[in-house]
Each structure stands twice: as structure tokens, then as C-alpha cells.
Amino acid sequence: MSSSTRKFRFDTLLIHGGTEAGPAGATTVPIVQSSSFSHATAEELEDIFRGRRMGQVYTRINNPTTESLERRLTLLEGGIATIATASGMAAITTAVLTIARSGDEILSSSSVFGGTFSLFRDTLANYGIAARFVDPTDLAAVRGGVTDKTRLIFVETIGNPKMDVPDIGEIAAIARQAGVPLLVDATVTTPCLARGKELGADIVLHSTSKFINGTGSAIGGAIIDLGSFNWDSAKFPHFQPFVTKYRNFAFSARARKLIHKDFGACAAPMNSFLLTEGVETLALRMERHCDNALQLARFLAVHPKVQWVNYPGLPDSPYHGVASRQFGGRFGGILTFGLADKPASFRVINALTLAKNLANIGDAKTLVIHPASTICADYGPEEKGLMGVTEEMVRVSVGIEAIDDIIEDFAEALEQA
Amino acid sequence: MNLTVNGKPATIDNQETLDITTLLTVLKVETPEYVTVELNGEILDRENFDATSVKNGDSIEFLYFMGGGN
Ligand SMILES: Cc1ncc(COP(=O)(O)O)c(C=O)c1O
């Protein structure tokens, strides 16, 4: 029987959700490495182009391997439709440009990933879309940031790398009152820790390059439409034709038929395959990432050379309460800590032998980086302050290796601090 | 009953009327969770699929946002 017809639990959906039997009984999704798809008659292709029937056309538009990943992500997030994209940045760009037009404003958390900050502040500004940044943990500031030009609110479930945790339910209430959708980047928590729908998001975004892939082998992104926002609104006249035709699929339809198709940041079939493979082990990996991160945070918190540790799993974190409530008692695989100064943090990074010094998160391997001199190097002190990036800060994406090996690696390297 | 489905004649034997949800099954419409249904030129609300019926002479169009061009 088709596994998509039964109501499975989350951990089973990770492995079987949305799958169909492959050719010759294959149990992994086939990599359909074809740019285009032929059809028997001109009438058939006309019907597909007119949207009268489903069918593959061209891999920039759709592809069977990518659709399999999209179906699974839709089920995992409890959404109505998903668009897989070439990268997390492509997902954010496509989603935002589907909603906002020249003259509009977007209201964003100030503690977002550096690439997102740069897209909102610099790139979109050149196209007439202005971003306002507010501290997402200051609800009065969020409320105060809404203007009659605001067309969406954007937050991350856990700010990367500030590690702040906004109360998403409260921000969702502000968005509802303002009549605009809430977009939540859930890259760092994944659907294992929190489903955007239960938190109150309207659209969930992922950089699937991170935990969903899980082994650092592919770049990808996803836009999951939760179908909760009513686009039939005077604020969104450009959605009207899509509301009329596609009702609660209006967002996905406008994204697919215009922005995603025209900008062309489509997923590659090979990457969709690798990302689907990653999804299957996500629950197990996230459990281990979270356990290991908590243990490393506890070790660092009492280490004499470590000035501070920022991990929402530590009881003295200002975000411990809200994170416990939102993420089911788990706190993710990323933490930051501070040493005496920048040279000390460089010495420790250089002395680590297991942990790799590189610009990524969510790999099975433990990764470290000095954010101020790398991913946030282009920003001045004011922006670094907003993003919570300081000179003595080291970010760790805690892997799923044996925790004793991870702790020994840090213990030895900290002798150089 | 005789219907026009996506501009082509279609006959459903032994049925004088059918609700939309059943019709989607009978006609083996692909990925019914994504289809928009237009009955005699009017787009139906998904919530009304069970309550809306087709009868002899009706014209019905299925519409997907997933594939194709515009
Ligand atoms: C929270 C978050 N969102 C988005 C992105 C961008 O994703 P990608 O690198 O897949 O474009 C990243 C990547 O570093 C991220 O950490």
C-alpha cells in the first residue's frame, strides 16, 4: 500500500512520509537527473501548462525527486505545500519577494543570520523594500515596529548566533493583529524541536543545508506554506488573482507561478535526494545534537578560562523558560561562549583537533567559528551588537560524536586560552 | 451522466449526481489535495467539496498551481 495514506507518527513520517514505491522496488527516492520531461501529445503538454493536470515540465519548475522531498517536508511541518529551493537564502528571498513589493516594509528580528540581515538591509533596499529591525524578545519593540506599510514579520526560532529565543506565539499574535503573515526561519530547531504551525507561524523557512541534510553534503532550502494566512486582504492586492483561483494556496501559487519560476533558484535533483536521505535520520540526530550541546555547555560553564556561555538549555539563560516551553525541553545543537579576548579565542580554535573550523552549522561533525572575523566581518560594531556578535565569541555547532571526545577536545584546547 | 471535464466530454455510468470529493476519486484526479475545482465557471471552496454535487450537463475544470507555466 502507499505509505502516504496512513496517519503515521512524526518519527515514522520522517522516513516514510510522502513516499511512493520506486522503480523495481527501490526504497530510496530515484534521482531523476533530467532537465525536461517529454509528453506523448501536444494536448497533454498544453493541459499541463494551463494547469489542467499535473505533470513534469522542466526541472526549474518541478522535478520528481524534488517533489518527493517537498511532500515529506509538507507532512513534517503539517503544512499545505512546500517549495524546495537551491539554498536557504533562496527560500528566504523567494518567500519575501512573493509577499513584499517596492514601497512595502518588512519587520525583521535584528538577531537573524548574517546573510538574511544583509539581504534585508542592503539588497532588498535597492529594490524599494525597506526593512525595520527590532529585538524579537522585546514585544513592545516588535509591536512598535509595525507600520501601515509592513507586509510581513520575520523571526528565527533561535537567533543565529545570538542564541536569543523569541516568544513566537506572542509575535504571531502581533502579526495577526497587524494583518500580516509571520515568517519563521526554523533552520536551527528543525520540525523535530518545534513545528512552526503549533508556534503560530504562517510560513516556515529552512536552510536544509544544515540539520536536515545533517552531513554537510548539500545546500538547499525550503518554503513551507502552512495555509493559515488569509491573503484576501486590501494589504495584498497583488494576491487577488491567486486568491480567486487557488484560495488558501494563494501564497504557494504566487510563489511558484511568479517568483520561484522567474528567479529560478530551483533545487537540484541530486541535492533533493541527499536532503531526503538526511530527513530520515533527523530525529535521532537532533536528539544527540541536543544532548551533546547541553553537556558541552555544562562543561564550558564551569571552566575557569570561559567567561560566559550562551545556550538556552542552561537554567541561567534568560531564554531558558521560553525555549523550554516552545521546544519541548530540548534546546538545539548550537551554543556560543566567550574567552578573554579575540586572540584567546583564535588560540583555542587553532588548538582544537576534532572540531572543524568552518562556516556551517548542523553537520554530524562538531564545527566552530569565530563569527566576528568571518561570517559577520562585514558589519560594524553597531550591527554586530544587534546580532549579538562580540570579539571574544566562539560559536560551536555541536556534532553527534561521542561526547567524551568532544569535551576532551575542548578541555585540551582551552589550555591554550 | 454526461459531463464536460477540462473541455472534453466524459460519461460517468450509473450515476445521476456525485459530490466533488467522490468525483475526484471516480475521475482518478491526481494529487486531489492540490487541485482547484471550477464548476460551471465558478471556483469552489475546498470546504464545500462534500456538499457540492455535479449533475448531467455540468462543466468541470481542474486547475493546478504546481506545474506548467502561467
Ligand atoms: C538560520 C539560517 N537561515 C538561513 C541560512 C542560509 O542558508 P543557506 O546557506 O542554505 O543559503 C543559514 C545559513 O547559514 C542559517 O544559519
Image (cartoon, coloured by chain):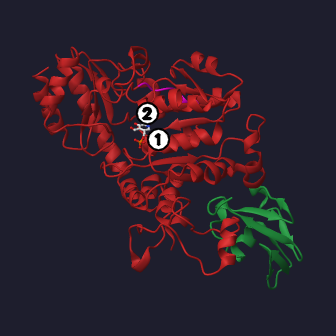
Q: Is mark 2 within 8 Å of ligand 1?
A: yes
The chain carrying label 2 is: A
Which dot marks residue A115?
A: 2
Q: Is residue A325 rendered to the left or right of residue B67?
A: left
Q: Is residue A25 rendered to the left or right of residue A262?
A: left
Residue A66 percent across, percent down from the top left? 48, 60
Q: Which residue, as the protein is rendered here, is positioned at the far front?
A: A126
Residue drawn 40% across the image and 24% down it: A320
Q: Which residues are magenta?
A: A164-169
Image hue for chain A: red
Q: Which residue, as the protein is rendered here, is positioned at the far bottom?
A: B13
Q: Quadrant of residue A310?
A: top left
Q: Which of the chains is green?
A: B
Element assignment for label 2: helix
Please indicate, yes or no, whether residue A79 appears anywhere in the rendered image.
Answer: no
The chain carrying label 1 is: A
Residue drawn 73% across the image and 44% down it: A239
Task: Name the residue that disc number 1 marks.
Answer: A89
Q: Amino acid at mark 1?
A: Met
Q: Is mark 1 within 8 Å of ligand 1?
A: yes
Q: Is residue B45 above or below residue A328?
A: below
Nearer-N-terminus badge (1/2): 1
By secondary structure, the bulk of the magenta-drawn segment is best described as loop
Q: Is residue A254 above or below residue A155?
A: below
